[in-house]
Amino acid sequence: MDIMSIIISIASALYLVLGFFVYLRNRRSSVNFWFLFLVLPIFLEGMTMIGYRESSTLSGSIFWAKWLYIFASFIPSIFIFFTYTFSKNAKKLSPLCKMGIIVLNFIILSLILGSSFVIETVFIPTAGEKFISFGDLYFLYVLSVLLLFSISYLQLFLFSRRAFGLFRNQAKLVFIGTFLSGIIHIITNLILPSIGIFSFYWLGQVSFVIMMCFISYAIVRYRLMDVRLIIVRSIAFGIIFLLAGIVFSITTVLFSNLFANLAGLRANILTAVVLSVLVAAFYGPFRKSIERITNNFFYKQSYQPQAVIKTLAEATSSIANREELLASISQILLETFHCKKIAVVLIGRDGKQLTPALQNGFEKNVFEMLISFLKVIHPASRRFELTPGIQVIDELKARYENGDMDLTDPKLLYALYENDVAIVAPLYVKDLLIGVLVLDNKQSGDPYSNEDLQVLNIISHQAAVAVENSTLYGEQKNFTAKLKEEVSKATKQLRDANRRLKELLKLKSEFLTIASHQLRTPTSIVKGMLSMVVEGSVTGEQRENFIQKSFIGINRLEGIIHDLLNASELEGEKMKLACQCIDIEEVIGHILSEREKMAKDKGLTLEYKKPKNKPPLVLADRVKLVEALANLVDNAILYTEKGEIHISVSVNPAKRMLEVRIRDTGIGVSKKDMKRLFLKFSRGEKSMLVNPNGSGLGLFIVKKIAEGCGGSVRVESEGIGKGSIFIFTLMTSPKSAEKNV
Amino acid sequence: MENSKKIKILLVEDEQAIVEMYQVQFQSEGMEVAVAKNVDDGLELVESESPDVVLLDLILPARGSVIDPSNRGGFLILEKVHSSLQLKKIPVLVLSNLDTPQDRERARMLGAKGYYIKAQLLPKEISTLVKNVVK
C-alpha cells in the first residue's frame, strides 16, 4: 500500500464520517440526506480506487476499474439531486428527469459490466501507474458525466446568484467547493486518462477534500445543514485521534524495542496495558484542552451554555425588581452573544397593550415595529419546532425572498432588518406570550448558530418566567403599598370626621349653654320682678317700674329667641341665601323710612347721602339684607345719644364691590373690642348700659348675612366715645358693572 | 335679727335690671348692697368693701370691654377670694344663669359656698340664702 492509497483511504474515511454526522444531526432535512447520499459514491469510488491500485492481477484490476467508473458515474447523478434540493428547487426536478437519470446510470452500469465498450482492459507495467485501455463508447461515458455535472453546476450557480444573506454565502461556498473538486476530478480521472496520462489518477479522489473543506467552512461559518458544533467537535476529536495515534506509535516502538528481548510476545501485552493507562489518565484533560483550542479557533467569542444558563438562573432567582432583572438579563445576553443592542417589549395584562420594558441601543421606532411584528408573526411562531418561536430576521428575509414564505407585511421585516434587529425571541410563560426580546447581530459578523438559538431559547423561557414573576411581585408590592395608603387615608378621613364631629358637638353644647344663659337672664328678671310685685314687697313707682321692666324683659326674651333660631341656622356654615340683583338705594330708602321716627324721637339726624352716579346693582338676599342693615342702623341709633347717623355708598369697580357705610357719633368701639364684636354672644361693655336687651347675636348675624352673598362687614372707630363706622360690603352684579363702565 | 349687725352684700352683676331688682329686695330687708358691674370693679370692691357675703355672676366683662361668654370673668374674683388669707373667710355664692357641670365643679374647687341659678330662684329666696350663709 503506497502513500497515495493511504491518503485516499484517509480522505475517503473522512468524507464518510462527515456525511454520517451531517445526516445523523438532522435526519429530517433532505439536504442533509442527499449530502450523505452524495458522500457514499465518493467514498465507494475511493475504496474501488484503492482496490484498483492495490490489485496485482489483471482480472482483479479490470474488476476494480469497472466498478471505479460505475461509482464515478453515480456521483454526478446524485449531485443533481443534492443541488436541486439544496437550492430549494427539488420540486422542479420532474419524475421524468429523475427516471432519465436513473436509466442513464443503469445503462452505464450495464455497458461497463456487460461489455468492453467502455473499459477494455488494464495494462500493468512493472513500474509506475497502471493504465486503462478504454473502449469505443468511452467518449459517451465522458459526455454523459459532463452533462450531468453541468446541470448541477448551472443549478448551483443560479441559486448562488438568486439567494440572499446566509443562503447566498452557503450557495457560493458549495458551488466553489464542488466546482473545483469536480473540475479536478474530471480532468484527472476522465480527460487525462483518455489521452493516456494516469500519473494524476489518484488525485481525483483527494480533490474532494477541497469540496469538503468548502462545505465544512460553510457549515461552520454560515450554519449550513445546522451541524456546526458537530464539525467543530469532530475536528477536535480528529486531532485527539491523530495525536493519540502518534503517541501510540511512538510508545509501541519504544516498548517493543525495550521489552522485545526480555519477554517476546508479552511485550505487546505490556505495551497495550501501559498505553491504556496513559489514555485513561490523559484523555480528560487532553480532550478539554483540545476543545478549548478548537473553540478559540472556531468561535472566537465563545461561551459555555451551561455557565450562561447558570448565571442567568442565579440572576433571575435573586432579583425581584423588574427593571433590575431586565438589566441583568440584558447584560448576560450581550456578554454571551457579543452583540451590542437589546430590547424587551412586554405585553400588558389585557393582552393587547405593549410596553417597552428595556431599550439598549435600538432606535425607539423598533418598539413600534415589534408591536406590529408580533401581530404578524405571532400566530405562526409556534410552528417552529427546532427553535420554537425565535425568529432569525436574516433567515426570514431570505426565505421570503426565495418565495418559501408568505409575509403579510414584508416592509416590516425589512424595517427590522435595517434597524439591526437580528433575532426576535418571544417570551413565553407556558403558552402565554408575555413579550419579546430582540438582539442585533453579533459584533463579529458571525450569524447566530443553532446552538446560540437553542441557548437563547432556554434563556428566553427562563427570562420570561422571571419577568412574569417580577411583574407579579411588583404588582403585589404596588397593591400592598396602595392598600396601605388607602387604609391610612381612610383612617385619616375617619379621624378628621371624628374630630370635626367632636368640634361640632362641643360647639353645639357651648351654644346650648350660652343660649340657655341668654334666655334665663330676661327670665330671671321677669320672674323675680313679678314675684315681688305679686308679694307686694314693692309699691308705688317702684311697682310700676318693675311691671314695665318685666314687659321689656318679655320682649327681650322674644327677640333673643328669634336671634337664637337665626344664629343656630347660620351656625358653622355660610348662610344659604337667595342672592339676587338688588337696588341698594331702594333697600336703604326702605330702612330709612322705617327708622326715621325712632331717630327723630331721640333727637338724631338720620340721612342717606346719594352718590353722583346711581350705584350698581348688588348681589344679596333682599329680606336678609334689610335685616342686616336695619340691625346696623338700629345699633347706631341705640348707641348714639346726640348727633347724627350718616349712611353713604361707595363703589370699588376693580374689586366689583360696593360698600355701605353707616357712620354714627355714638359710644364708639375700643381697639380690643373690634375683633370680638362680631363673635357670637359678645357685646360691648358699654352696650349693657345702653341696650340691656341685646342677645349678643346681632352683629354675628349681620356678619353671616354679609358673608352669605360674598361680602363682609367691619367696624372702624377712633376709640371710645368717638363714634363708629360700620362698613357692610356687597358684591356688585356683573351685569350692572358692565352697564356702569 | 335686730341684734345682728347690718349684713353687707357685694353684688357682682352686669345686668342692670337684675341689679335693680336685688337691690330693692335686699335693702327692703335691711341689708347693705355694694354693686360691681365688671370683673375689675369686683376685684377692687371685694377688698375695699369687706362684704359679709359675695353674690357672684360668672359671665362678666372686663372693665370697658366686650363680654366674651366663653371667658367666665367671675372666676377671677372667686380665685382672688380663695387664694387670699384675709378674704378667704368671706363666703361667696355663685349666682349665675350658666349651668354646666364644669362650671359648678370649678366653683366648688375655688371654695364657693353655693352655686345657684338666678332664673330658678325668687329674690326673697336669695336673701334667705344670704342670711343662712352669713349666720
Image: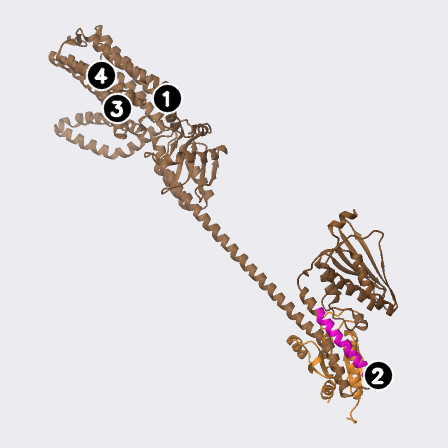
Q: Which residues are magenta?
A: A540-563
Residue A100 is labelled as: 4
Residue B125 picture quarter: bottom right
Q: Where does the image place residue A664, in percent across and percent down from the top left?
A: 84, 63
Question: Which residue was labeled with disc 2?
Answer: A541
Question: Which residue was labeled with disc 3?
Answer: A34
Give how far apart the Cα atoms at labels 1 and 3 are: 20 Å
Give how far apart the Cα atoms at labels 2 and 4 are: 156 Å
Give how far apart the Cα atoms at labels 4 and 1 are: 28 Å
Any part of residue A541 in sight: yes
- Viewport quadrant of the N terminus of chain A: top left
Regarding mark 3 in the picture, which secondary structure is present there? helix
Of mark 2 and mark 4, the one earlier in the sequence is 4
Q: Is residue A562 rendered magenta in the image?
A: yes
Q: Chain of mark 3?
A: A
Q: Amino acid at mark 1?
A: Ala
Regarding mark 1 in the picture, which secondary structure is present there? loop
A21 or A393, nearer to the observer:
A393
